[in-house]
């Protein structure tokens, strides 16, 4: 550790950063497993993990070694050449995702851009001149122009019109609204939804995952692409490798990012079934698509999730958290929702300040989404002892807050 610079020297110069983020008044200089540390060495339990990103925990030795070795060997050559790590990562990812084709992108939004392009091209191949995609209320798909247009949140869109056209919005979980849309819009070519809405408040549809089965049926009936945004729910987070695997159906297009790189920025858009073969040479690309470095990280993340049985651990620990929160907060008028280690505790009132209270009084890093939902996204390898500490701190805090 002696030769490692943990943070640059602080200055009191004005910041040159665009002020687009509402930041908390704290910074971390080191992470280890489920914990983060400030410069003075104070330890925080991390139940946010960089927003569902660092599933393997901070400074996991396998990821550190993969990055260090590959950085010292070969980082990037471009896709004008074969990239052996990219081929290997795609094979591993396709296997766990149940998909056939993989395109590596650099973020969640970019993965969804790829899905939107696939849907449009799929439409044009069938002579649909103005292909449309059904999207849901309260969804979040990213911050690029097409993905913010697909997003079901006015705040994300405000100030950025004209929006990208070609999206038809329906209430999340409303199958009749989809069937109604099909009658009025003969140019629909695809549906894009999240299996569990993360930013929207850790919500499944009211009918649960059977919503996805219904969507599959409708997509088959109309020859539409079924596209799932698993940017947040993928990579073991919900106690299955991908959340759709809680069902018996398979989507045609699947996107992911966040946990795919454990902090290294990389995402993927994948296809099977009628999504295969839509994008061909010259249709899509990215300078950084599947660099040797990024691909080796993906390969190592998947390999580690498998070797350490982290999907199983996420399912078990997640079930334990939900059971304990439900029991210990039974008199608090809260709703506990959980799928693996994607856990939401909905409070009867707005609770944004709990982020600060958790951090300052309980040394716990959490997130509050949709105004009144505590969202917990701990490391996939969280152990029972750490889970018990998390439960104890959350229960105490929520009881105080609602007292
Ligand atoms: C975070 C997220 C995105 C956007 O991913 P970025 O990497 O921030 O572009 C898209 N969809 C869902 C469901 C997300 O949770």
Image (tube, grey):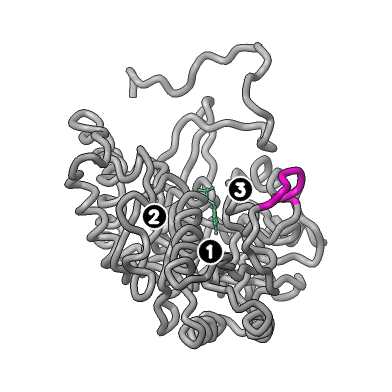
Dot 1: what SS? strand
Image quarter of the C terminus = bottom right
Q: Residue at the spot x=76%, y=43% of the render?
A: 159
Give the residue at mark 3. 145
- Please tell me whether mark 1 or mark 2 is closer to you in this view: 2
Dot 3: what SS? helix
Characterize the magenta stretch by its predominant secondary structure: loop
What span is colored magenta in the figure?
155-163
> Which mark identifies residue 342?
1
Residue 299, position as x, y percentages in the image: 26, 52
Dot 2: what SS? strand
- Please tell me whether mark 1 or mark 3 is closer to you in this view: 3
Give the residue at mark 2. 268
- Please tell me whether mark 3 or mark 2 is closer to you in this view: 3
Q: Is residue 21 above or below residue 85?
A: above
Residue 113, position as x, y percentages in the image: 50, 53
67 relative position to 54: left or right: left
Q: Is residue 147 above or below residue 349?
A: above
Image quarter of the N terminus = top left
Q: Residues within 10 Å of mark 3 (few under 14, many from 20)?
A: some
Q: CA distance from mark 1 to mark 2?
A: 21 Å
Q: CA distance from mark 3 to mark 2?
A: 19 Å
Q: Is residue 44 above or below residue 75?
A: below
60 relative position to 207: left or right: left
Among the two numbered marks 1 and 3 on one chain, the one whose residue lies closer to the N terminus: 3
Q: Is residue 128 above or below residue 107?
A: below
């Amino acid at each position: 550790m002696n030769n490692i610079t943990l943070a640059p020297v602080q200055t009191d110069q004005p910041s040159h950063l665009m002020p687009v983020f509402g930041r908390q008044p704290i910074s971390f200089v080191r992470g280890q497993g489920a914990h983060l540390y400030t410069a003075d060495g104070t330890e925080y339990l991390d139940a946010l993990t960089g927003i569902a990103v660092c599933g393997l925990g901070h400074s996991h030795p396998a990821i550190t070694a993969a990055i260090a070795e590959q950085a010292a060997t070969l980082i990037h050559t471009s896709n004008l050449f074969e990239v052996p790590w990219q081929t290997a990562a795609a094979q591993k990812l396709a296997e766990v995702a149940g998909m056939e084709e993989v395109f590596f992108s650099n973020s969640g939004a970019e993965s969804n851009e790829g899905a939107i392009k696939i849907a449009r091209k799929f439409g044009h191949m069938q002579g649909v001149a103005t292909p449309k995609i059904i999207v849901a209320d309260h969804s979040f798909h990213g911050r690029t122009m097409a993905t913010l247009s697909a997003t079901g949140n006015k705040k994300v869109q405000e100030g950025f019109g004209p929006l990208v056209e070609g999206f038809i919005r329906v209430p999340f979980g409303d199958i009749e609204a989809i069937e109604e849309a099909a009658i009025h819009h003969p140019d629909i070519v695809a549906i894009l939804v999240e299996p569990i809405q993360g930013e929207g408040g850790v919500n499944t549809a009211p009918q649960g995952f059977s919503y996805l089965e219904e969507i599959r049926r409708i997509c088959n009936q109309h020859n539409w692409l079924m596209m799932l945004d698993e940017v947040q729910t993928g990579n073991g987070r919900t106690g299955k490798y991908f959340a759709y695997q809680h069902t018996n159906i398979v989507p045609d297009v699947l996107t992911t990012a966040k946990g795919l790189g454990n902090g290294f920025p990389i995402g993927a858009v994948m296809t099977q079934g009628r999504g295969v073969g839509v994008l061909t040479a010259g249709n899509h690309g990215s300078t950084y698509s599947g660099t040797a470095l990024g691909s080796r990280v993906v390969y190592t993340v998947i390999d580690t999730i498998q070797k350490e049985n982290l999907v199983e651990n996420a399912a078990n620990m997640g079930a334990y958290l939900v059971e304990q929160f439900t029991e210990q907060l039974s008199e608090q008028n809260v709703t506990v929702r959980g799928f693996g280690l994607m856990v939401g505790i909905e409070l009867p009132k707005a609770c944004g300040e709990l982020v600060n209270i958790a951090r300052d009084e309980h040394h716990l890093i959490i997130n509050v989404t949709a105004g009144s939902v505590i969202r917990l996204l701990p490391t996939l390898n969280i152990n029972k002892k750490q889970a018990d500490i998390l439960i104890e701190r959350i229960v105490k805090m929520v009881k105080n807050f609602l007292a």
